[in-house]
Image (cartoon, rainbow, N blue to C red):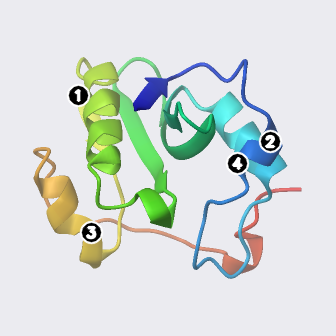
Amino acid sequence: MIIYTDDLVEIKPIELSEFFNGWKNNPTPEKLFTILKNSSYKVLAIDDESDKVIGFINAISDKALSAYIPLLEVIPEYQGKGIGSELVKRMLKKLEDYYMIDVVCDESVQKFYEKFGLKKHSAMILRNYDKQSGKD
């Protein structure tokens, strides 16, 4: 069974080592733990049989008007089982009182987010790929 939590108390950085598959310069498990700890909101998916963190979503917010969802990750062996969808649903429930909820994503996953009522829009971004592992 998959359990969902926003509590990091029982989570150790080493349990976050299987994420960011395909990234050339991914954040370390310690950096990911810091990202989650510092996020305004987060939801983690845990396989209760193995106590393994298998997915997460986070949001950064001004806690008044807007929120941004920068990361949604599910480790490959658990993809296609509805876990990502459940993480998005739970996060959108947490953010339902905000005016602006933004996700910037690759075109290949836009249809996924459309299922939750998000609409394709234009955005401007800057990516410093040499900093992909996070700020020191």
Residue 121 appears in the picture as rendered: no
Image spot of residue 83 (x, y percent): 34, 45
- Look at discs 1 and 3 and give the one toward the viewer: 3
Determine which quarter of the picture holds residue 93.
top left
Residue at label 1? Answer: 99
The disc at residue 13 is: 2
Q: Residue at x 14, y 44 (%)?
A: 116
Tell me the kind of residue under disc 4.
Leu
Q: Earlier in the sequence, mark 4 or mark 3?
A: 4
Image spot of residue 18 (x, y percent): 66, 60
Crowding near the residue tagged with mark 2, few <14, some 14–19, many ≥20 C-alpha atoms within 10 Å: some
Q: CA distance from mark 4 to mark 1?
A: 31 Å
Count the marks. 4
Image spot of residue 69 (x, y percent): 42, 44
Determine which quarter of the picture holds residue 1.
top left
Q: Residue at x 34, y 73 (%)?
A: 106
Q: Residue at x 21, y 55 (%)?
A: 113
The disc at residue 109 is: 3
Crowding near the residue tagged with mark 4, few <14, some 14–19, many ≥20 C-alpha atoms within 10 Å: many
Q: Earlier in the sequence, mark 2 or mark 1?
A: 2
Residue at label 4? Answer: 16
Q: Earlier in the sequence, mark 4 or mark 1?
A: 4
